[in-house]
Amino acid sequence: MPRILITNDDGIYSRGLRAAVQAVAGLGEVYVVAPLYQMSASGRAMTLHRPLRAKLVDVPGAKIAYGIDGTPTDCVIFALARFTEFDLAISGINLGENLSTEITVSGTASAAIEAATNGIPSIAISLEVSREKYKFGEGNEVDFSVASYFLRKVARAVLRNGLPDGVDMLNVNVPSDASEETGIAVTRLAHRMYRPTIEERIDPKGNPYYWIVGRKCREFELGTDAYALKVERKVSVTPINIDMTARVDLEDLYELLVI
């Protein structure tokens, strides 16, 4: 039986993670290692300045499940140290879309990237939500059934066929209004989804404090993940290569630098 690792950044008690476990039922032996708490926007952060604590958690459908008081990347590292080998890693189903080059901020995508750096074919999957407040909850108001359908479809294909040469992971985003008949678009990353800024506010004692807030971009280039999801209302599947080296002639660049 294939061995499947499932993690996320919404926490081990989120309904999206439970939906991911159910989505791959029968496809392999499922191991879950996920944060004990909400860890959105943690990127590839690792916990290096304190010990990690692990707690066994009952997750129906999983052979074993650990909650870790650390980041999604910590969870992948823990899983590989504890269980050594996996045939597929899945991160999600995330509450809220993860689009554009900003996926490096996402704990969901970063967990899949961490697994991919260890040679494990990986899938990050996110479900667009209709209201911002849903993004940081456990997903009690959200229907994951269609996202689960597409996750099973993609996971089964990857387990059967592997990923093409040069592809280390797939970043999948499902529209909030998708059905099982919704089309799939294979896309590239948009440049940006948000333009972060700072809001200054004043506390009751008159001291300023600051929130990082994101202003959503409204226009996206054809062929990008954001265009497919936001304009075409399709399921976006973006192939990701974790080698971020620019595709340029290295000799030309060397000559440019040494002259």
Image (tube, grey):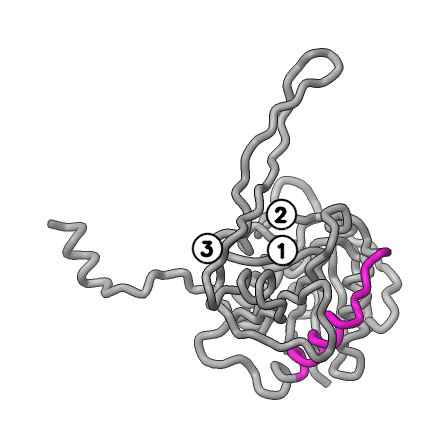
Name the residue nearer the viewer: 33 or 146. Answer: 146
| Above or below for 177 versus 14 | below
The numbered disc on residue 73 is: 1
Judge by depth and name the residue closer to the eye, 67 or 84.
Answer: 67
> What residue lies at 86% left-to-right and 59% top-to-bottom?
57
Query: 10 Å neighbourhood of mark 1: few (<14), some, or many (≥20)?
Result: many
Horizontal and vertical percent position of residue 137: 79, 49
N-terminal of the pair, mark 3 or mark 2, is 2
Q: Secondary structure at mark 1?
A: helix
Report the predominant secondary structure element of the magenta stretch. helix
Any magenta on residue 155?
Answer: yes
Q: CA distance from mark 3 to mark 1?
A: 24 Å
Question: Which residue is at 78% across, 53% downward?
Answer: 54
Q: Residue at x 63, y 53 (%)?
A: 107
Q: Is residue 217 magenta?
A: no
Q: Position of residue 217 (x, y in %)?
A: 53, 49
Residue kind at label 3, given as amino acid type: His
- On the question of residue 72 being in view, the answer is yes
Q: Earlier in the sequence, mark 3 or mark 1?
A: 1
Helix, strand or loop at label 2? It is loop
| Residue numbers of the magenta segment | 140-156
Depth check, mark 3 against mark 2: the one in front is 3
Which residue is label 3 attached to? 191
Mark 3 vs 2: CB contact within 8 A: no
Which is more toward the observer, 138 or 87? 138
Q: Are marks 3 and 1 in contact (CB under 8 Å)?
A: no
- Residue 42 marker: 2
The amino acid on which the numbered mark 1 sits, given as a three-letter code, is Thr
Describe the element under mark 3 as helix, strand or loop: loop
Disc 2 to disc 1: CB gap under 8 Å? yes
Residue 163 position (above or below residue 250): below
